[in-house]
């Protein structure tokens, strides 16, 4: 278990399009474990590799539901539909929350740590978290999508991604 430091905005790595993963080896498995430990340590519901300083297309999401931890390597959005607006935060922007509008539904394909391709459909908050993390891999930060920043009294235990 190795908790990594979170890269805080501004930092060049956070606004960079990350490179695809080509090796599905033990090093990748260890990195995913470290990302999980780091996300949990910081009470996050998602974490992308650039947030620990790595230029790689790797992200994890865990919103504490029956899906458990979703590991997304080289993820691609296949389809989106609908719309949702809700509060969002990010571990790279401590104590900053804003309303973001995103598709309600998302269908993605990605690879797991063994290099097996899978497809996943998600709605609502899980879809929001997945899209937030995939944005990180493109160097897109949630602040570029915020329609309104939220004051502390408007937040009730929001978690960051
Ligand atoms: Co984030």
Image (cartoon, helix red, strand yellow):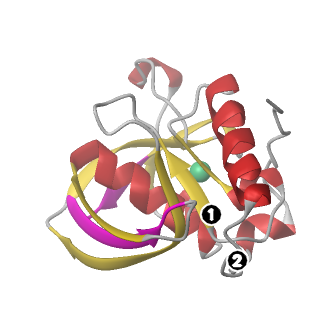
Quarter that holds the C terminus: top right
Who's the residue at 75% across and 56% down the image? 26
Left or right of 55: which side holds 22?
left
Q: From the viewer's side, name the closer residue of 37 and 104.
A: 37
Say whether residue 107 is magenta. Answer: yes
Q: Nearer the viewer, mark 1 or mark 2?
A: 1
Q: Is mark 2 within 8 Å of ligand 1?
A: no
Residue 58, disc: 1
Give the magenta-colored segment's residue range. Answer: 99-112
Q: Position of residue 42 (x, y in %)?
A: 68, 27
Element class at badge 2: loop
Frontmost residue, 150 versus 50: 50
Q: Is mark 1 within 8 Å of ligand 1?
A: no
Magenta region, main secondary structure = strand
Instruction: Identify the image quadrant of residue 154.
Output: top left
The percent coordinates of residue 48 (x first, y second) are: 64, 55
User: Nearest the camera: 86 or 139?
Assistant: 139
Total marks drawn?
Answer: 2
Quadrant location, the N terminus: top right
Residue on which disc 2 sits: 18
Q: Is residue 27 magenta?
A: no
The x, y position of residue 83, in whole percent, is 19, 62
């Amino acid at each position: 278990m190795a908790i990594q430091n979170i890269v805080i905005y501004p930092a060049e790595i956070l606004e960079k399009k990350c490179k695809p993963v080509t090796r599905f080896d033990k090093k990748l498995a260890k990195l995913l474990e470290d990302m999980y430990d780091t996300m949990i340590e910081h009470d996050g519901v998602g974490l992308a590799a650039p947030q620990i300083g790595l230029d790689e297309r790797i992200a994890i999401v865990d919103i504490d539901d029956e899906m458990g931890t979703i590991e997304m390597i080289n993820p691609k959005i296949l389809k989106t539909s609908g719309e949702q607006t809700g509060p969002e935060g990010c571990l790279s922007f401590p104590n900053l929350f804003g309303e973001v509008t995103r598709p309600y539904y998302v269908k993605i394909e990605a690879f797991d740590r063994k290099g097996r391709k899978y497809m996943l459909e998600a709605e609502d908050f899980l879809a929001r978290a997945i899209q937030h993390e995939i944005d990180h891999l493109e160097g897109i930060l949630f602040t570029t999508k915020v329609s309104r920043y939220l004051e502390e009294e408007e937040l009730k235990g929001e978690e960051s991604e």
